[in-house]
Image: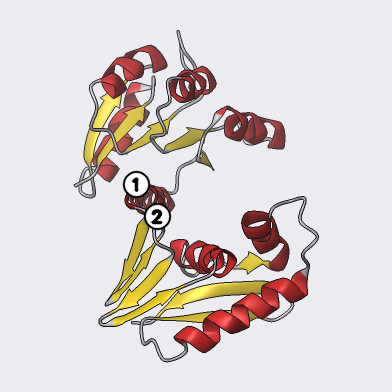
Amino acid sequence: MANVLIIEDDDNMRMLLTVRLKNNYNVVTSKNGKEALSTVENGGIDVIVTDIMMPQIDGYEFVEILRSRGDNTPVIMLTAKDSISDKGKGFGVGADDYLTKPVNFEELVWRINALLRRSKIANEGKITIGQVEVNKESFTVTRGEEVYELPSKEFQLLYLLLSYPGKIFTKENILDSVWGYSSESDENTVRTHINRLRNKFENFPEFDIVTIRGIGYKAVIKK
């Protein structure tokens, strides 16, 4: 099981989080950011769930120190501070996700699992879906004896969609992520690349690329 570090100075909340998560993960706890930094230095932590308002080192400072050390362990900020400015500050210092109290524990598990999956994809540089392997190093899609070497933008687009199956990406999201903010490419470029990917992989039973009319696209993993 994955190792999840909970940083929470409130004893009752820390205990409640531990009880609710221990069936899904190996749970490690710290009472504050200072203690947590020592825990992280020992290695083996896969995801961190941290409160913000804590003594000695608060959640913002904890994440800031963590990122300054080059540590990219995924972090979820769990807090009662729910204003846009608070969330902006959290993401600004390097948090990966932000969930407000009172905690919906089912949602927290979903978010932890999503971060674990993204971290695994980032570390391995490949996505495996059934018999299909999408390899970021070689820009290839392999299924059995079939090997497709894709042009850069086609591959980046496919990799983006398959990294977050079920998530809807607007055309603007895709343009920014694949072509960059300063690109002069437009929605027709996205549509063209989507069509090319569909033509190449329409017979694959593992996934589909679905159009959400008026919004964008998503990848759907077939059961």
Q: Which residue is mark 2?
A: 110
Label for residue 107?
none
Q: Residue furthest top?
A: 56
Q: Quadrant of residue 3?
A: top left
The relative height of residue 113 versus residue 70 in the rendered view (above or below) is below
Query: SS at mark 1?
Result: helix
In the displayed structure image, the side of residue 206 where residue 77 appears, left or right: right
Query: SS at mark 2?
Result: helix
Percent across and percent down for residue 174 are 65, 62
Percent across and percent down for residue 89 are 64, 29
> Residue at left 61%, top 78%?
194
Q: Nearer the viewer, residue 184 or 21?
A: 184
Q: Which residue is mark 1?
A: 123
> Residue at left 49%, top 70%?
166
* C-alpha gap between disc 1 and disc 2: 20 Å
- At label 2, the amino acid type is Trp
In the displayed structure image, the side of residue 215 where residue 124 appears, left or right: left
Q: Residues within 10 Å of mark 1 (few under 14, many from 20)?
A: few
In the displayed structure image, the side of residue 94 where residue 212 appears, left or right: right
- At label 1, the amino acid type is Asn
Does residue 31 show up?
no
> Residue at left 55%, top 64%?
152
